[in-house]
Image (spheres, rainbow, N blue to C red):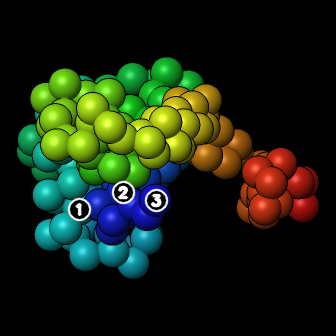
Amino acid sequence: MAFSTKGEYGVRLMVQLGRHFGTGPASLAGIAAEEDLPRAYLEQLVTSLREAGLVRSTRGAHGGYELARDPAEIRMGEVLRALEGPLAPMICATDDPEHATTCDRSARCTVNVLWVRVRDAVTGALDSMTLADLVPKPGAPTTLPTTTMTGALTQP
């Protein structure tokens, strides 16, 4: 299961907003420069994030975007669903009724259980992490923990 640039760039945008949390709005131009991302694309992404209630905007000379909630209250699954839509490897495994479709093989499908388990594993992992988990703490080392192929965290 792969995420598009919407998910990748959107998560990077949210991490930058998490770094600015509590300091007022951040400009998309500044975030685009910091992350080396196209500003026009970030403008599209921030619309989805705002509609999902994850960010809010402020107009004016000192305007920009900021998180609508504390980073510790924002689950990464929520962010990726706002950007990508349902997090399912196959449409038949979606748990989102708005996007669910009935497969013509559903009555005799032998592999749906696989796709549901993949969906549950991915959503479980994403929903177990918050934005605060990705935002470096002031004074913390810049090298973040990595994961092994089995998903176990290793410290630098």
Left or right, 149 with respect to 117, comes to right
Among all residues in the image, which is located at the extreme front? 108
Q: Are marks 2 and 3 in contact (CB under 8 Å)?
A: no
Measuring from the top left, give residue 97's x and y in whole percent.
19, 25
The amino acid marked with disc number 1 is: Leu
SS class, disc 1: helix
Residue drawn at x 19%, y 67% is 41
Residue underneath mark 3: 1
Q: Quadrant of residue 27?
A: bottom left
The amino acid marked with disc number 3 is: Met
Measuring from the top left, give residue 146's x and y in whole percent.
78, 59
- Label drawn at residue 28: none
Measuring from the top left, give residue 130's x and y in whole percent.
56, 32
- Nearer to us of marks 3 and 1 is 3
Distance between the Cα atoms at labels 2 and 1? 11 Å
Residue underneath mark 2: 7
Q: Are marks 2 and 1 in contact (CB under 8 Å)?
A: no
Camera-nearest residue between 140 and 51: 51
The amino acid marked with disc number 2 is: Gly
Residue drawn at x 10%, y 41% is 59
Dot 2 or dot 3, earlier in sequence: 3
SS class, disc 2: helix
Camera-nearest residue between 64 and 101: 101
Residue drawn at x 29%, y 61% is 6
Measuring from the top left, give residue 2's x and y in whole percent.
43, 63
Residue underneath mark 1: 42
Left or right, 71 with respect to 79, comes to right
Among all residues in the image, which is located at the extreme left? 60
